[in-house]
Amino acid sequence: RVAAGKKPLLMREILESAVKSYEIMGGLGIENGFTAVGLDHTLLVKIASAAVLTRMLGGTREEIVNAVSHAWLDGHPLAAFRRKPNTGPRKSWAAGDAASRGMRLALMAVKGEIGCPAALTAKTWGFYHVLFKGRPFRFQRPFGSYVMENVLFKIPYPTAFHGQSAVEAAIKVHPLVKDRLEEIKQVDVRCHNSSMVILDKSGPLYNFADRDHCMQYMIAIGMIFGKMTAEHYEDRIAADPRIDRLRTKMVLREDRTYSRDYLDPAKRTNSNSIKVRFRDGTSLPLSEVLYPLGHRRRRKEAVPVLMDKFETNVARVFAARQRDAILRACLDQKRLEAMPVDEFMGLLSL
């Protein structure tokens, strides 16, 4: 924009665009089961990116519609790469890949590419008929800022969202089981339906991507080590025989209350609980976490931890002076919102 003689976008516009992107993805995802028909949720990243980026490029309403229509007509990623036997590093680049396609469609739209008016609804050939069993989309609420306000931060543990509370519950019992692992007869795990579908895995786990989407593996790490870091997914630690022995003792069951409250827009819990039973007939009290640390209901408790994570990661990449400049900009909301995008990106240049 600057090179073309235009005013640069301000960071406030970037933040507003982020809210819009999340709202589009969440608004589509809350009531419509894309995974249930085998489609990966990064499809929604592409849709949101096409819409919001077209607007950021100065596109008209018609051009936004055109870009989004082509996004719906694309071939869409299958959810197979998040599940055995296909789990692998694609999980890490799938969202970026989808966003780049959204960007490509946005650029085409503002250059005059016409849209496809019945991309969703065309009989025989439209998205609804081909990929959604003929069902039109449903929406729980008007578009606003609900999704961003309720976003779940992945703060304390590098695990899938549905495993955050499970790891927290497992770490709670660590002091009580660390010296009694061989005495454990069974570990009863209660979780909601989405956790059962996505994270319930038995048998060999072949790589880090396989492990970070296995509920049993996450819980075993928490119980054995009393913590969870990215290193715990590496082959060196995964080779510890205690992990697989403990995994085989776990029984996952759906808790219908957890499933109901997970879908309740007023609660949006992400609950897990662990009950450890020993061979001598004794057991530990139930370790239950209804809301993980990154949940909206634990914001006051979570913000200091989130800030510490942010500052730590910035310090890992940037020298002290540059680190301090980045932190000053990000921690001053008024200054950040008024800052031109190119100036902010300059702060991040290595």
Image (cartoon, helix red, strand yellow):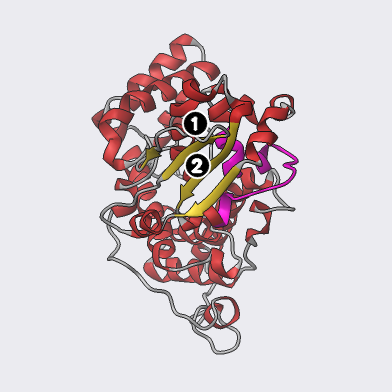
Q: Which mark is residue 157?
A: 1
The three-letter code of the residue at mark 1 reads: Tyr
The answer to which of 303 and 174 lies nearer the viewer is: 174
Question: How many numbered discs sit on the rendered protein?
Answer: 2
x and y percentages locating residue 214 in the rendered image = 61, 44
208 in the magenta segment: yes
Mark on residue 261? none
Q: Is residue 346 magenta?
A: no
Amino acid type of the residue tagged 2 in the rendering:
Gly
Q: Residue 116: where, in percent of width, then height?
A: 53, 78
Q: Residue at x 63, y 47 (%)?
A: 91
Residue projecting furthest to the top: 320
Residue occupying the point 33% across, 32% down: 339
User: With 243 as the anchor, is 54 left or right in this view?
Assistant: left
- What range of the chain is rendered magenta? 197-220
Give x and y (percent) for residue 176: 48, 23
Closer-to-camera residue (27/177): 177
Quadrant of the rendered image containing residue 81: bottom right
Label 1 – label 2 distance at C-alpha: 9 Å
Task: State the mark number for residue 163.
Answer: 2
Residue 149: % across, % down: 29, 46
Q: Is residue 124 above or below residue 285?
A: below
Q: Are marks 1 and 2 in contact (CB under 8 Å)?
A: yes
